[in-house]
Structure formats: structure tokens, C-alpha cells
Image (tube, rainbow, N blue to C red):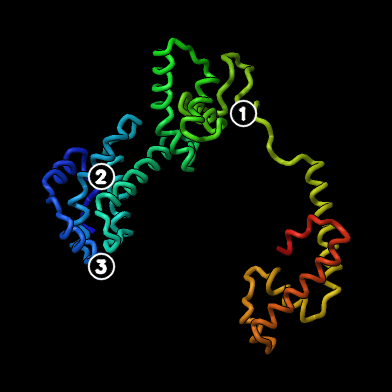
Amino acid sequence: MALDVTASDNVLPRRAMKAEMLDAETEMQLARAWRDQRDEQALHRLITAYMRLAISTAAKFKRYGAPMSDLIQEAGLGLMKAAEKFDPDRGVRFSTYAVWWIKASVQDYVMRNWSLVRTGSTSAQKSLFFNMRRVQARLEREAMAQGAALDRDQLLQMIAMDLGVPLRDVEMMDGRLSGSDFSLNAQQSSDEEGREWIETLADEGETTAEMVGEAHDQAQLRTWLGEAMETLSERERFILRERKLADEPRTLESLGEELSLSKERVRQLEAGALQKMRSMLETNRREVHHFLS
């Protein structure tokens, strides 16, 4: 597509302001031409007409410190994605549909670039990132108007209730928004022998005892499964190996063709074999059941 969303801060907004305003009928015609005929001229005209919407949305995120040119570029990419996915037969104006994609694209960019540490991408985390400080300011104003004083814990709890997110997420985001990135190799004090911050991190890896115990459990599991497999007929073992143990499990149809059986008969044999194995394994540990699910 010919539209350049990487133009300078001034050039692209000027172009966007001069773009035509589309009525609903023309908008639908252009959208159908792109969807049905992959008409790139129609797509270019549709995108150009709504680039001012993308720029206007991008401008609302300037306070997060990202360059305006980058915000506009991300907004343009969101606009293009909206054009690609838009269905003109649903009776919704393109601008109404596109604004969600534009906003989502810009928000994702802001969150990706806020910190070297990924801030998060779930709906709850996005709600926190973009609304936490606004809600906090409102709650503080309301408390001040009532002559009340909120401590930090009370404030975070009220923010969590207001936004409908877990308190732990609010506490995490508060720390992310309040602090800045620093090297884990930086020393905790100015002393030459001061510890580096990385030395304070707990090792989240498995302990030796846990690894040994897990290895023992896995070995026992393999033994039990092997014994259970031996109770099956050769055909049943073949079906289970191909359906449950192969890197690329085979379909019932392909096994039926190879064994000269119907798809339903292969399914019955598989179900019967699994039931035999379950019956034997129930005398051992019930934890192995998930393997057969």
C-alpha cells in the first residue's frame, strides 16, 4: 500500500488534515472493494481518509513519553489492521470499528516500551497501566474533600476495587510505574565490597531434592505405564502408540485405513484400551490419570 505512516511528525498530520471526508455510502463501497476485489486504491483512500482519526488517538498517549512519530506509526498500523478485518456488511461505520484497533495498537506499543521489563498485556494489566494514576488522583481528591487521609495500603485497595482487579496486580503496577529500570549488577551501596542486587534474588529453580524426587516419580510412572501397556493386545498397543505417544498423533481415519477398520471401530478399540490401562493404574497412583486424558 502506498500510504507512508513513517512520515515526519509534521508532514503526515498535514496530509491527514487535507484528506477527504467519507460519507457512509462511499466508505462501504471502498471497504467492499478492498474485501472482495483486494482493490489497493480503495484501501489507500479508506486509510488516508481516517488517518486523522489515528493521529488524534495517538496524540492522547503523548504523556507516556514515547515519540509522537512512533505513536503515529503504531496508530497507522492499527488502522491498517482494522481495514483488513473490517466487515462492511455488519452495518457499523468504519471509524467506530477502527478506533478500537488504533487504540489497542498504540497501547501495546506504549506498554512494550515503558520499561525493559515487560509491564504486562492482559486486559486487567492494561486497565491498570492506563487508568491507575487517574483513579488514584480522583480517590485522593474525594478523600481530601471529605477531610480524610488515606495511607498507601488503603489507597491501593480502593484502586483495586474501583477497577475490579486483584490487589496484587495493583501493588505490582504501582511499583512498575513508580520506579525506573536499573542494572541488577549495580551495587546496593557505594562501598567497593557492596553486594550486587542480583545476589538478593532467590533462586527459583528446583532444589536437588525436588529434582531427585521428580526423577524417581517419572521413572515409576514409566514403569507402571509399561506394565499397563503389556496387558493390551498388539493392535491396541499400536493404536495407543499412534494416537497418544507419537509426535504427530494420527487420525482415526488414517488408522482405520491401515487396519482395514471403520473410524468408529478404531475409536472403540482406543477407548477400550484406555479403560484397561486405567483399571490397572488405579491400583497404583491416581496422578497418572492426566496422562490418559
Residue 235: % across, % down: 77, 81
Badge number at residue 38: 3
Instruction: Count residues near mark 3 (Cα–Cα under 10 Å), then give few for <14, some for 14-19, many for 20+.
Output: few
Closest to the observer, 225 or 272? 272
Q: Residue at x 33, y 59 (%)?
A: 85
Quadrant where the C terminus is found in the figure: bottom right
State how far apart marks 1 and 3 are (Cα). 54 Å
Residue 13: % across, % down: 18, 41
- The nearer-to-camera label among 1 and 3 is 3
Q: Residue at x 21, y 41 (%)?
A: 8
Residue type at mark 2 is Ala
Quadrant where the N terminus is found in the figure: bottom left
State how far apart marks 2 and 3 are (Cα). 22 Å
Do labels 2 and 3 touch, CB within 8 Å?
Answer: no
Residue 257 vertical position relative to residue 222 in the rendered view, above or below = below
Residue placed under numbered mark 2 in the picture: 54
Q: Name the quadrant containing residue 218.
A: bottom right
Residue 239: % across, % down: 72, 77
Residue type at mark 1 is Ile
In the picture provided, is 8 more to the left or to the right than 243?
Answer: left
Residue placed under numbered mark 1 in the picture: 198
Instruction: Count residues near mark 2 (Cα–Cα under 10 Å), then give few for <14, some for 14-19, many for 20+.
Output: many
In the picture provided, is 265 more to the left or to the right than 152?
Answer: right
Instruction: Count residues near mark 1 (Cα–Cα under 10 Å), then give few for <14, some for 14-19, many for 20+.
Output: few
Residue 109 vertical position relative to residue 181 in the rendered view, above or below = below
Q: Residue at x 48, y 43 (%)?
A: 122
Residue type at mark 3 is Arg
Question: Which secondary structure, mark 1?
Answer: helix
Closest to the observer, 92 or 40? 92
Q: Name the quadrant containing residue 292.
A: bottom right
Can residue 177 be seen by looking at this rendering?
A: yes
